[in-house]
Amino acid sequence: MTVHPSLQTYTDAWTHSIESIAELVNPLTEGEWNGRTPCPNWSVRDIVSHIIGMECEQLGDPRPIHTLPRDLYHVQNDFARYMEMQVDVRRHHTAPEMTSELEYTIIRRSRQLRNETRDPETMTRAPLGAEQTLELALRMRAFDVWVHEQDLRTTLGKPGNLDSPGAAIVRDTLLAALPKVVAKDAGAPPNSAVVLDVHGPVEFLRTVRVDAEGRGSVDGSPSLGPAVTLAMDWETYVRLACGRVRASAVMDRIKAEGDQDLAAAILQNFAVTP
């Protein structure tokens, strides 16, 4: 037996996205690797370094022994420091070094996934010495590489794959965080509902319902008389939810109906990625 059937979706999505990333960066000139991306404080090189580092950790490779410079002012907590280590250690690598390491990492990781026999509930390595199930690890790698593929496409002016296999995983992962955004972070009142209407390459209509105790849940049923309805395109939704842009910068792409104060609070707390 190879990969468990419940893991195949994540493996396929990861493969599609990471191979797309390799195709995007292989022809880049040295200077293009320094281009700023929508991912805060990271260049093209930094994103590829991050991807290489995270996949190497899933392979069981030891983390680099490296001291971060003191002038990385965007590194404000332990999680950011953990993530930055794999990035900073490669900041002076040349374009050929980056592409060759990425290619080698993809080969190794693809072989590992093809030969995967572990149960989805097997506990595996996670950041900061924590553990997570194999299924969660693969889902988050599929999520991560798709989002970073879009970061790179934005920077390089090569849009595409907004509806690729990874998009569905990103949609479901972001929607799972929406009840907390609406009920807790934005403080939607008890017994209220908020409708999210997303159009474009990935289309969906979801309702976040806040019960009498203030707990949120999300479903696909429409709501009569919601407190707020937010309509936007898929790309805008991803950019907002992944912290790539502030709502104030894309309000021309968002239609908010209903309680405007609540709508503003939801959009202010929309980003759910670390």
Image: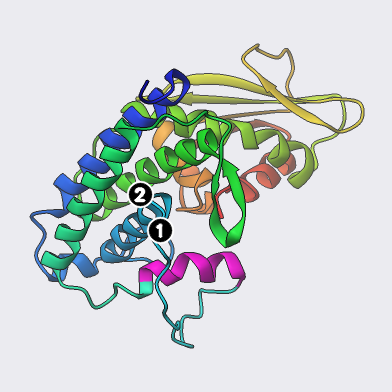
Q: Is residue 181 above or below residue 129?
A: above
Checking the image for residue 39, the label placed there is 1
Residue ID at (47%, 53%) = 245
Checking the image for residue 196, the label placed there is none
Q: Are marks 2 and 1 in contact (CB under 8 Å)?
A: yes
Does dot 1 land on a helix, a strand or a loop? loop
Q: Which residue sits furthest right? A: 213
Crowding at mark 2 (Cα within 10 Å: few <14, some 14-19, many 20+): many
Residue 209 is covered by the magenta coloring: no
Q: Tell me which segment is drawn in magenta.
A: 77-87
The residue closer to the viewer here, 88 or 203, is 88
Image spot of residue 134 (x, y percent) = 51, 37
Does dot 2 land on a helix, a strand or a loop? helix
Mark 2 or mark 1, which has the lower sequence index? 1
The residue closer to the viewer here, 234 or 48, is 48
The residue closer to the viewer here, 253 or 53, is 53
Q: Is residue 72 above or below residue 133?
A: below
Left or right: residue 262 compared with residue 42: right
Tell me if residue 237 can be seen. Answer: no
**What is the count of numbered marks?**
2
Left or right: residue 247 compared with residue 219: left
Q: Where the C terminus falls, by quadrant?
A: bottom right
Looking at the rendered image, the disc whose residue lies closer to the viewer, 2 or 1, is: 2
Residue 80 is covered by the magenta coloring: yes
Tell me if residue 1 can be seen. Answer: yes
Residue ID at (26%, 55%) = 155
Checking the image for residue 148, the label placed there is 2
